[in-house]
């Protein structure tokens, strides 16, 4: 049986088209099944959100509200504990405040006492320094006077060394007898502290500073006598001072004064 060539081509094309349609259907069904499985794997929360956006927002708001509630409960518990602590401490608070105020006052008192002590220490140190300077000045003044006396003695005894032995023997006796005669003048150091001195001076003599009166109740009543001459103050000779300079020097205290006075007569015997 002879079949025309054109008919064969048409039949072949129709067969191939049917096979292609079948393949497309199978591929589409496979893709559908794959999407269906993926959808089934979505969690309920997101599934609901995918289905209803408003429901998803409500779920998130509910979760946030739950978290805020938990935090509020925790804060309330802490406040309750703090309230209990305050109730325990409240009766003790007034006494604690009183003790704190008393401690502050005690600290202020101690600070004031410390400052006062520091001022006193500084004043004592300054007084000691002035006394040391006064003593040093008086020592230098006495050293200078001794040097002058030694020079005078050396000059006086130089001619006597050229005389004979009889003259030397004769001169030894008077020297021995006048070593400490009664009524000889002596120089004593006197310290002058703060406060009124109670001394009056004979101001008729511009050179000599001689005591004319002593207050019996003054601090130096046992250190000065009427007739004493203040020969130096803190190492400075008073004979070269005017009365104004002398008064100013007496104001600077504590100080040291050299006083020349006559040794009292002993009446021939001593006890």
Image: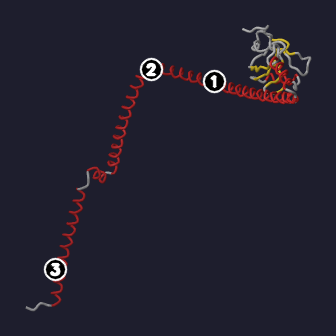
Q: Are marks 1 and 2 in contact (CB under 8 Å)?
A: no
Q: Nearer the viewer, residue 196 or 172?
A: 172
Q: Position of residue 11 (x, y in %)?
A: 16, 83
Mark 3 and mark 1: Cα distance apart in space: 126 Å
Q: Residue at x 37, y 29 (%)?
A: 81
Q: Quadrant of residue 260?
A: top right
On the rendered structure, is 35 left or right of 252?
Answer: left
Q: Residue furthest left?
A: 1
Please tell me which residue is depicted at 76% across the width and 19% down the height of the picture. 190
Position of 125 with respect to 79 (left or right) is right
In 3D space, how far apart are the residues under numbered discs 3 and 2 (Cα atoms)? Answer: 105 Å
- Give the percent coordinates (x, y) of residue 98: 51, 19
In front: 26, or 160?
A: 160
- Which circle's residue, 3 or 2, is located before the other in the chain? 3
Marks 3/2 in contact by CB < 8 Å: the verdict is no
Q: Position of residue 225 (x, y in %)?
A: 80, 13
Task: Give the residue number, with chain letter if any, for mark 2.
Answer: 92
Which residue is disc 3 drawn over? 15
């Amino acid at each position: 049986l002879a079949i025309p060539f054109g008919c064969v081509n048409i039949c072949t094309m129709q067969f191939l088209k049917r096979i292609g349609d079948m393949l497309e259907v199978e591929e589409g069904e496979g893709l559908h099944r794959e999407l269906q499985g993926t959808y089934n794997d979505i969690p309920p929360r997101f599934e609901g959100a995918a289905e209803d956006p408003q429901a998803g927002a409500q779920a998130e708001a509910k979760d946030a509200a739950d978290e805020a509630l938990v935090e509020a409960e925790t804060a309330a518990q802490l406040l309750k504990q703090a309230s209990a602590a305050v109730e325990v401490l409240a009766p003790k608070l007034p006494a604690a405040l009183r003790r704190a105020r008393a401690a502050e006052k005690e600290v202020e008192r101690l600070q004031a006492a410390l400052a006062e002590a520091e001022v006193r220490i500084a004043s004592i140190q300054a007084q000691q320094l002035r006394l040391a300077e006064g003593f040093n000045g008086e020592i230098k003044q006495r050293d200078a006077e001794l040097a002058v006396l030694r020079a005078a003695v050396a000059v006086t005894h130089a001619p006597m060394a050229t005389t004979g032995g009889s003259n030397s023997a004769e001169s030894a006796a008077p020297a021995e007898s006048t070593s400490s005669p009664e009524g000889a003048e002596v120089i004593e150091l006197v310290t002058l502290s703060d406060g009124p001195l109670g001394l009056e001076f004979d101001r008729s003599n511009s050179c000599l500073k001689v005591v004319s009166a002593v207050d019996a109740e003054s601090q130096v009543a046992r250190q000065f006598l009427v007739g004493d001459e203040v020969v130096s103050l803190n190492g400075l000779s008073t004979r070269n001072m005017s009365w104004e300079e002398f008064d100013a020097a007496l104001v600077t205290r504590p100080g040291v004064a050299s006083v020349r006075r006559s040794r009292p007569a002993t009446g021939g015997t001593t006890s």
